[in-house]
Image (spheres, rainbow, N blue to C red):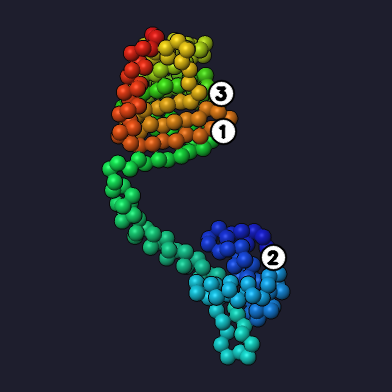
Amino acid sequence: MDEKLSTLLQNIGFTEKEALVYLSLMELGSGTVSQIAQRAKLKRSIIYIILEGLIKRGHVSEMPETKISRYIAVDPTKILSDLKNKVIDLKNLLPSLLAIYNKPAWKPKINYFEGKEGVASVYRYIENVKEAYFITSTGRIAEHLPEEVEAWITDKLAKSVPLVGKHLLSNTEMDRDFAKRLKGTKQQIKFLPKGLTVDMDISIYENKVALTSLEEHLFIVVIESKALYNSMKTIFDLLWEQGVK
């Protein structure tokens, strides 16, 4: 039995046992329950249940006018046709689903991204917003994304992006260097009050709050909520007032 084919069938909705039965029938051409059970290495009692489900979904049919019931796998191109029809149905249904999803004004929208590229993609988006507020540690970000940090300093934040940003940084050597190199740009920088440090990046922008874990497993959670944005902006403003230039 080809395990790759079995995995592909499972990826489009078959269970593992359904894939075994369908592929067994493809190899047999047609088969009785006993023959299918022998080829798939499954119990006869299970085969009856699986065949019933596959017949209902149109993947298997029972051959007519045979003394002993024999079954045949339906042409696999029908599976492709069924999938295409489901995609069309989903596209037609999507506007209605989105209307329901977006309806409650209080409901926050949450997106989750993993890994360097996932986090960097959100940061690249933030570069192009009108204004944003950050509570962060450049040094901690550079542990994961050194190339991005250097690009922000030498090009993006300094020259080419429209973002006007306020940055509250940990008072470390690397963050002080970051502040010096951005002197004279559209970016305003202060250091957190003495004794305060951050182990994650907090970005506040466009009614969104993005929280980046800077631990070994890198990920970012973006929450869109006006109430959360307003609360975090208030906290940021209080810290900014206490921040060290």
Quarter occupied by residue 165: top left
- In percent of width and height, residue 36 lies at 67, 75
Q: Amino acid at mark 2?
A: Met
Give the label on residue 225, or none: none
For label 2, the SS is loop
Question: Which quadrant, please, contains the N terminus?
Answer: bottom right
Give whichever of discs 2 and 1 has the lower sequence position. 2
Q: Is residue 110 above or below residue 161?
A: below
List the residue tagged with mark 3: 143
Q: Is residue 176 above or below residue 71?
A: above
Measured Cα–Cα span from mark 3 to mark 1: 12 Å
List the residue tagged with mark 2: 1
Q: Amino acid at mark 1?
A: His
Residue at x-position 38% and y-position 8%: 245
Is 126 or 234 nearer to us in this picture? 234
Give whichever of discs 3 and 1 has the lower sequence position. 3
Q: Quick check: 237 left or right of 221? A: left
The residue mark sitting in front, 2 or 1, is 1
Near mark 1 (Cα within 10 A), the count class, few <14, some 14-19 or many ≥20, is few
Q: Amino acid at mark 3?
A: Glu
Q: Is residue 16 above or below residue 230?
A: below
Residue at x-position 30% and y-position 34%: 226
For label 3, the SS is helix
For label 1, the SS is loop
Q: Quick check: 153 left or right of 52? A: left
Q: Is residue 68 visible?
A: yes
Q: Quick check: 191 left or right of 44? A: left
Near mark 3 (Cα within 10 A), the count class, few <14, some 14-19 or many ≥20, is few
- In percent of width and height, residue 101 lies at 33, 49
Give the label on residue 217, or none: 1
- In percent of width and height, residue 139 lies at 52, 19
